[in-house]
Amino acid sequence: MSNEIAVLRIYSSEMEAIMAQQVLEGSGVTAYVFSDDAGGMEPHLQRTSGVRLVVSRSDVERASEILEGLVSS
């Protein structure tokens, strides 16, 4: 199993990324949320640099399918 991670999607807010993370984890895919917002002290930076949802490189295809299923539902 590879320890490499890949950015699955970039969201404009932490809340959106966390909701997607919860959906993935509910389906058995481990996901992490990373944002560059000075430790939450500068939340406006989320809009400019985005909030990254990352998964293991081996889970990218499955995670993409899960999140696509939300959009088409």
Image: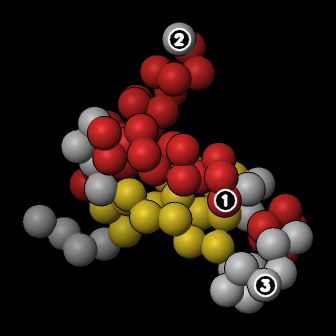
Residue drawn at x 48%, y 33% as measured from the top left: 67
- The nearer-to-camera label among 2 and 1 is 1
Q: Amino acid at mark 2?
A: Ser
Residue 34 to residue 25: above or below: below
Q: Earlier in the sequence, mark 1 or mark 3?
A: 1
Q: Number of callouts in the render?
A: 3
Q: How is the image coloured?
A: secondary structure
Label 2: few (<14), some or many (≥20) within 10 Å?
A: few
Residue 45 circle label: none
Asked whether residue 57 appears in the rendered view, the answer is no
Residue drawn at x 56%, y 14% as measured from the top left: 72
Per the model, the C-alpha gap separating discs 1 and 3 is 13 Å
Which quadrant would residue 48 be assigned to in this image? bottom right
Residue under circle 3? Answer: 41
Quadrant where the image shows the N terminus: bottom left
Residue 73 circle label: 2
- The nearer-to-camera label among 1 and 3 is 3
Residue 37 image offset from top left, x and y in percent = 74, 80
**Residue at the outermost bottom position:** 38
Label 1 residue SS = helix
